[in-house]
Image (cartoon, grey):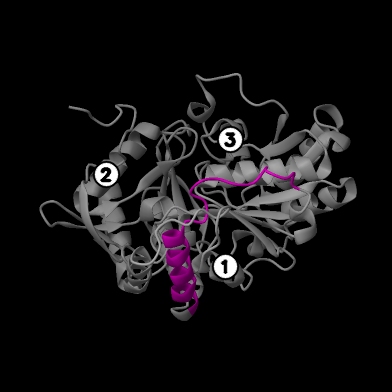
Amino acid sequence: MSTLSPVLKQATPVTAVRGEGVHLYDEAGRAYLDFTAGIGVTSTGHCHPRVTAAAQEQVGKLVHGQYTTVKHQPLLTLTERLGEVLPDGLDSVFFANSGSEAVEAAMRLAKQATGRPNIIVFQGSFHGRTIGAASLTTSAAKVRSGFGPLMPGVAIAPYPNTFHYGWDEETTTKFALRELDQVLATVSAPADTAAFLIEPVLGDGGFVPANATFMAGLRERADRHGIQLILDEVQAGFGRTGTFWGHEHFGVRPDIIVTAKGLASGFPLSAIAAPKELMAKAWPGSQGGTYGGNAVSCAAAIATLDVIQEEKLVENSAERGAQLISGLREVAARHAASEGAGGIADVRGLGLMVASEIVDADGNADGATAAKLLQESAERGLLLLPCGAHGNVVRMLPALVVNENQIDEAIRLWGETVDAVLGG
């Protein structure tokens, strides 16, 4: 008898047998309010009728048409439809299966297009677990450890994480840009730097938004030195932050964009997009893959776009996100960390990408208490996830279809959870 790898640790004790909207149901039929969305994947909720119908219809026509062997209609339609939502000028698309694959494709494109060997990433980033993507990841040592040496040619610069540094936004941003310039002067010269790779909102690194001044600084340096600006929108994209793309909050223009997770409402699909002129600089044979652009996944992605647009889910994300962060801050005010007392030290996020940071009485990351909060929350019927280098950040990322009453219910359950664990 075989079993799952013991290294796979579930964040909740639930065995799900059915999903509908923002709810999962276990074997006993108990409903759980799912504020994980499969780590931001089920953007239109579990088993949205239109997405399910599109996938079912496609299964009966063509399951797999390998896209460097034959083309298929869902692939062509999705490519065209993405043109409606992609940033201006990014008019050429390559499809893969996962965020890691797409990140590696973006990195390869940037290196081949510029002829430069290095990538600069930012502290706290998560870009994937394959060897190249893991080499670009700094959210936690566990992603990078135990299988080195990692890929060379990666330099790390600070992310403008105001909570981490304990400074105001202006001070933090000036520091981060100054340190980036120092990296360019001492570690990876501009002539050796193919790309900056950054998440507009750190995902696994703690749900930390960047800011407009910092992103403008990246764009200016990229333009000045001929460096490609790659935005990893795997978790922040497709309406998650209350704008279609997370970077829209900051008014920055990407050269290459990476998307996955919410793209196909649960079906495996990822993509990169770039201007045709840039994409054409990829070397022949450097892009491909057996399952990329799968017909069923593409059909689901088309339906996902329809649902997001017709049900105004980007707008809903902004409205419900404001409601969620306000409610979480009210809970945090009752259990605020202070000198000599642990608790909730920060509530932050954009749209439906919101997190609470848990610290101990000395102000240090408190992953043990965060784990207790996650278990207590699950017992009360609210499923949440940890993130951050120390596992002390509790993140909420419900499906974009979540309604006002469901947000209120989640805030109530979270409040009861925090009262039970921290005392209330």
Task: Tell me the magenta residue range.
Answer: 282-309
Q: Amino acid at mark 3?
A: Thr
Q: Look at the numbered disc 3 and give the secondary structure of its residue.
A: loop
Query: From the viewer's perspective, is the residue at label 1 or at label 2 nearer?
Result: 1
Residue 375: % across, % down: 26, 42
| Residue where numbered disc 1 is placed | 76
Classify residue 139 by image quadrant. top right
Instruction: Tell me residue 73's x, y (percent).
Output: 51, 69
Q: Say which residue label 3 marks.
A: 137
Tell me what residue is drawn at x 56 percent, y 48 percent. Answer: 208
Q: Is residue 31 magenta?
A: no
Q: Where 23 falls versus 166 (above or below)?
A: below
Q: In the displayed structure, does residue 410 sit left or right of residue 30?
A: right
Callout 1: helix, strand or loop?
Answer: helix
Left or right of residue 117: residue 389 = left
Residue at mark 2: 423
Depth check: 138 or 336 in front?
Answer: 138
Q: Position of residue 240 (x, y in %)?
A: 50, 62
Q: What residue lies at 52% left-to-right and 31% top-to-bottom? A: 140
